[in-house]
Amino acid sequence: MKYKLLTIFTLFLPFLTIAQDAVDKGLDEKINDAFMPIATKWESIVLTPISLGGYDIPIVLILLILGATFFTIFFKLPGVTKFGLAINTVRGKYDEMDDHGVEKADINVVDGDLPDTIRDESEEGEVSHFQALATAVSGTVGLGNIAGVAVAIALGGPGATFWMIICGLIGMSTKFVECTLGVKFRDVGPDGTVYGGPMYYLSKGLEERGMKGLGKVLGILFAVLCVGASFGGGNAFQSNQAAVQLTSMFNLEGGAVGVGIGVVMAILVGIVIIGGIKKIASVTEKIVPFMAGIYVIASLVIIFANIKYVGDAFEMIFAGAFTPAAGIGGVLGVIIVGFQRAAFSNEAGAGSAAIAHSAVKTKYAASEGVVALLEPFIDTVVICTMTALVIIFFNMDTGAFEYGNAVGSTVLLTDSQTYVGGVDLTSMAYDSVIPGFRYVLTIAIIMFAFSTMISWSYYGLQSWKFLFGRGKTADTVYKILFLLFVVVGAAATLDAVIKFSDAMILALVFPNMIGLLFLFPRVKEELDKYLTDIKSNFE
């Protein structure tokens, strides 16, 4: 335990320093400058490239693509062949197969659990298929869909959209594998609480295959990285962007404003996360369909308003995917842009979603695997594509930016020669057809940020429990730290921390994908068992 504590506190010392001082707006730049070398170094390690075709391609991206492609081929295109099965499972068609005949009465909820259904939960889990899906989707659908797509198109041209879609389709296979394993190797406590995720299937699954040492190392590594990612990219970045959007929209200034916004968000997040996964799931199953519905409806309105340009837009997408315009780079460059942005968006291969899916009520591990494959489809294939079409239409009408003119997370506007953030470009595109939609988009960003934070609080807490045990004191320490970072993120300039935490999310791919490549045969066994029982019960 001592080496675990030393590792975790060494890792988070820079974060704790920021938490102590960052609310003083005068220290923002000093803190950012001091931490930037650490963040830059970590990012360079995670994104270590190899040269291919004249391009430096991050090894982590190659691992994601090759792994997802392998799973897609091995499981015979599950994103297509198991799509109908996934829909039927998430809508509860096969729920009676999980009915163990335990009588469920109206009882009180104590500490987020149902004490009179302990035996039932020990066998089945804590949340429904839909709640698990909503919780996982809420952790991925967010600013990556709003701002990330705009930057991808501005940098890689319309063709980047095609490769984002491809990444989403093959990512469905990876989600299927990791979430099946999440349920297969989860732990269930005496009180019915479920503990699951890559740290468990890495340690337990690899031990089962005679690689106990490797499994323990990979499990601890994943848990440490996941806790860091939950404080940074899953928390501070979200509250920061929500605060920035609010202050920009209403022309607010001053450090106290950021602190105030952060405190309010921390209170709201705290109310939810104190209740555990059941409370988180009950909130996300309402927020996610609502916010996604608003965004999708607005996108459809704009798409139908530009229906005569849909054919031209898709022609640009397909043509740009294989014959990119001059100045953008070769085809490989467009592929890299599309895949990298999609990977950031849907997190397939990072393993984070498996933590939420592990809590599902089922005795069939593969049932949640097929439900999970819907996640990249919703996040990347549907929502990202709609966003892309809206931005392409906007640029066709206005020529607002030249494809290839993007730096980092900003886009150069042709009329003013000024850079704007990706979220600003998306806001401009939607507002051009639906005047005033920027206010709705602001609300959507806040809701996206809120839902992402509560989902990542669960991911981080589960990893924290894996490292420090399942006592209430450890839980309380984590939740206090998490809520502290909500305030810090809203109040401070955290460019370096965001760079560090985003790289940490991608770093999850290394231990997770290694485990998936060793354990995927168990997924085949679970899928065969689930399909056999469906056939015997429903055919």
Image (tube, grey):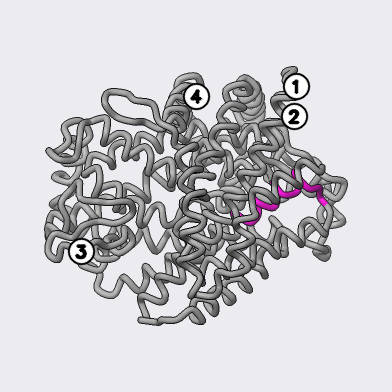
In the image shown, does 481 or 245 lie closer to the viewer? 481
The crowd level at tag 1 (other Cα within 10 Å; few <14, some 14-19, many 20+) is few
Residue receiving disc 1:
208
Which residue is at 58% across, 39% downward? 351
Q: Disc 4 to disc 2, how far (Cα)?
A: 21 Å
Earlier in the chain: of badge 4 and badge 2, it is 4
Give the residue at x 31% y 61%.
Answer: 421
In the foreground, 384 or 236: 236
- As drawn, 119 above or below 199: below
Look at 55% across and 73% down and name the residue there. 23
Is label 2 in a helix, a strand or a loop? helix
x and y percentages locating residue 87 in the rendered image:
51, 41
Marks 1/2 in contact by CB < 8 Å: the verdict is: yes
Residue 71, labelled with which disc? 4
Q: Which residue is drawn at 20% across and 52% down?
A: 392
Spatial distance from mark 1 to mark 4, Cα to Cα?
21 Å
- Mark closest to the chain's N terminus, 4 or 3: 4
Q: Callout 4: 10 Å neighbours few (<14), some, many (20+)?
A: many
Q: Position of residue 361 (x, y in %)?
A: 70, 45
Image quarter for residue 116?
Answer: bottom right
* Nearer to us: label 3 or label 1: 3
* Disc 3 from disc 1: Cα separation: 57 Å
Residue for badge 2: 204
